[in-house]
């Protein structure tokens, strides 16, 4: 850590729970963020500002005018541009010490390769198929997964850290193949600050994991009703018969 970095990250270093050692862990780390939209925008901004060494940004979409209500990493002039490239420009201006790598939409081997390279994975996607694919890869490579979701006024976040044999995976909570009606922002709407709240919490959980400090949300699902600003915490048990993680 050079003198400029010591000054830049001094407010983290002053925290005894992080200190120089914890901040160095953050600087030496690689994080994969899948989705650079409503959740991925605030998550990426805080991960970059906190000094994560390498951010892998995965998103196959382009910036649309309707995104700008909540996807704060993008700008008016980015409309029509690939979201990853738009985010890269903003994040590099925020912190030139963080290396940004843009990835296309991840599938199959590309997803496995990206997850294997990461120290932590943030699922900021918006569909169950992607979430389950990310979860399977994280279980396979024993990578902690920080999962968030936000729709209308309802948000949720949890951590699935299957490095521990007692912790559940995403499939334990939301079994794949269930007949679940998938809501989309484009048809049902979303409260703009809600995505900021959940995405920022994802960054907080990921940075804690990287700095090796605090207690994560592993084994708990945190639910937010932003319309009435009420929080609920639900314990999430591991499914001993889970077809994804039971063979750990």
Image: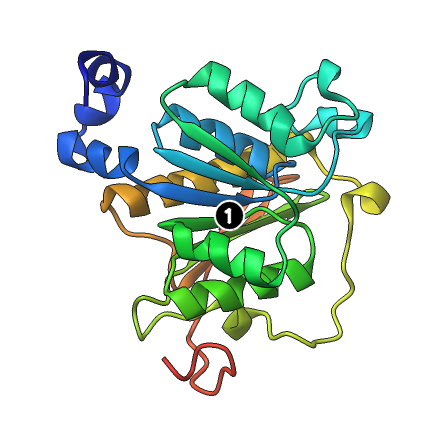
State the residue position of label 1.
231
Residue drawn at x 70%, y 76% as measured from the top left: 178
Tell me: residue 171, above or below residue 123.
below
x, y percent for residue 217: 38, 55
Residue 182: quarter of image: bottom right
Residue 60 in sight in this render: yes
The residue lying toward the viewer, choosing from 108 and 119, is 108
Residue 158 in sight in this render: no
**Is residue 115 found left or right of 171 in the rendered image?**
left
Tell me: residue 105, above or below residue 192.
below
| Image quarter of the C terminus | bottom left
**Is residue 213 found left or right of 32 in the rendered image?**
left
| Image quarter of the N terminus | top left
Tell me: residue 34, above or below residue 17.
below
Q: Residue furthest right?
A: 187
Q: How many marks?
A: 1
Residue drawn at x 62%, y 40% as measured from the top left: 228
Q: Secondary structure at mark 1?
A: strand
Tell me: residue 36, above or below residue 174.
above
x, y percent for residue 84: 62, 33
**Is residue 150 found left or right of 179 in the rendered image?**
left
């Amino acid at each position: 850590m050079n003198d400029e970095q010591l000054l830049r990250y001094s407010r983290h270093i002053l925290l005894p729970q992080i200190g120089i050692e914890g901040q160095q862990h953050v600087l030496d780390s690689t994080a994969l963020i899948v989705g650079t939209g409503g959740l991925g925008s605030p998550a990426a901004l805080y991960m970059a500002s906190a000094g994560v060494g390498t951010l892998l940004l995965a998103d196959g979409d382009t910036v649309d005018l309707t995104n700008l209500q909540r996807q704060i990493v993008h700008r008016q002039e980015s409309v029509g541009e690939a979201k990853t490239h738009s985010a890269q420009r903003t994040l590099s201006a925020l912190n030139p010490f963080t290396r940004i790598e843009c990835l296309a939409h991840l599938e199959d081997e590309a997803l496995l390769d990206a997850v294997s390279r990461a120290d932590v994975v943030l699922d900021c996607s918006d569909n169950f198929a992607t979430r389950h694919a990310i979860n399977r890869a994280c279980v396979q490579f024993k990578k902690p997964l920080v999962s968030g979701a936000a729709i209308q006024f309802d948000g949720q976040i949890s951590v699935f850290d299957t490095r521990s044999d007692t912790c559940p995976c995403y499939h334990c909570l939301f079994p794949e193949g269930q007949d679940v009606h998938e809501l989309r922002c484009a048809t049902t709407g979303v409260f703009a600050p809600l995505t900021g709240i959940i995405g920022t919490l994802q960054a907080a959980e990921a940075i804690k994991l990287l700095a090796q400090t605090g207690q994560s949300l592993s084994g708990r699902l945190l639910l937010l009703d932003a319309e009435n600003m009420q929080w609920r915490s639900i314990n999430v048990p591991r499914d001993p018969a889970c077809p994804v993680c039971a063979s750990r």
